[in-house]
Amino acid sequence: MRQIKTNSVNINQISINKINGTTNIVGLLGWPVKHTFSPLMHNAAFAALDLNWAYIPLPIVPEQIKKAVPSLQAFNFKGANVTIPHKQTIIPYLDKVDHLAKLIGAVNTIVIKKQVAYGYNTDSYGFLKSLTDANFDAKGSRCLILGAGGAARAIAFSLADARADTIAIYNRTKSRASLLVNELENIFSTIKFSSQFLSPQVLKLSQTQFDLVINTTSMGMFPDLEATPWPLDIALPQAVICDLVYNPIKTQFLKQAETVGLKTIDGLGMLIHQGAKAFEIWTDQTPPTDLMRQIILKEMERGT
Ligand code: NAP
């Protein structure tokens, strides 16, 4: 154990956390929350803007989720982020839910104002902002989504809301893709939707018909660095290739795309922008997105 010699500490050299009796508190509801970058990103942003706010992890098991919102209200929290596995199950406990979050069926940001708990989905904003940062216009585009889990829902509804022309969803479990397509068809009647089993045979037939291909599966995520949703021996379509996986930032799927000269969009942009939007919702301040990006990149370099 490291020995601390209290009588030799120089008070000017230690960084003292400025939390005090008037600090505004937000946090992250999830299970587990051990590997999150959010406290680091938000606390750095609060410090950069000299805001008396703090962001803390709030690990909560699924069986306790009904107590989450009343507890935030009781302790006068200003809000929270919500992550796996609570993004859907938190909804019945909120007082008001934003229209798009309701459509997606998932909330990742809560703000509490005068004891009223409002729910938003900033993943959607984060994803669309990462597209505009890359000069990709979703309106009128032909999109292929690989995967049909929670992230795919947010992406599919966002692209539909942004008036994409075509949205195809391929998933390992075909029924999950079909259910999502049925839901989308009931709401967005002018967009062409389709679903398929995610298989090499189907991918071989998808050579030229897409402008954007998005990996929303967890394939390629640390530690499975060699995994890819698109087999190496099947040519990619002439499309912009996007991967939601952000650890690593350059996934095998993005490397494949770069090798054949395709434009790529990594998952870090969405991660930063969803956090930045939450920051803005809570504080009404413009988030320091460059700093938020730098701090996450630095942490990733440290290999944590
Ligand atoms: P999820 O709800 O568990 O969905 C996982 C998806 O991946 C499902 O479609 C699943 O197919 C598919 N999948 C998993 N393993 C597979 C395999 N070996 N072969 C084929 N398909 C496979 O997870 P999620 O919340 O959607 O997250 C998915 C990924 O997106 C994660 O890597 C997450 O980190 C990333 N993400 C990034 C951001 C960001 O800000 N950049 C935000 C959200 C999520 P089945 O339906 O067949 O199981």
Image (cartoon, helix red, strand yellow):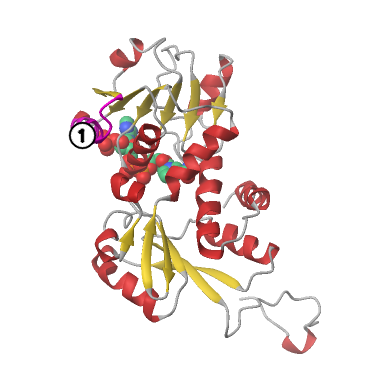
x, y percent for residue 191: 31, 25
Whether ligand 1 has any atom under 8 Å from the Cβ at mark 1 is answered as: no
| Vertical relation: 93 (above or below) 17 | above
Q: Judge left or right: residue 53 versus residue 62.
A: right
Q: Residue at x 61, y 50 (%)?
A: 296
Q: Residue at x 39, y 12 (%)?
A: 209
x, y percent for residue 102: 30, 50
Q: Quadrant of residue 185?
A: top left
Could you tell me if residue 161 is visible in this image? Answer: yes
Observer-nearest residue: 57 or 184?
184
Q: Quadrant of residue 44?
A: bottom right
Q: Judge left or right: residue 95 versus residue 234.
A: left
| Vertical relation: 109 (above or below) 144 | below
Task: Report helix, strand or loop for mark 1.
Answer: helix
Q: Judge left or right: residue 89 versus residue 218.
A: left
Confirm whether the magenta stretch covers residue 179: yes
* Residue range highlighted in magenta: 175-191
Could you tell me if residue 222 is visible in this image? Answer: no
Residue indicated by mark 1: 186
Residue ranking furthest to the bottom: 7
Observer-nearest residue: 261 or 73?
73
Q: Quick check: which quadrant has ligand 1?
A: top left
Q: Judge left or right: residue 210 versus residue 184.
A: right
x, y percent for residue 42: 58, 60
Confirm whether the magenta stretch covers residue 108: no
Q: Quadrant of residue 259?
A: top right
| Vertical relation: 147 (above or below) 117 | above
The three-letter code of the residue at mark 1 reads Asn
Look at the image and tell me in which quarter the N terminus lies.
bottom right
| Vertical relation: 58 (above or below) 246 | below
Q: Residue at x 47, y 67 (%)?
A: 27
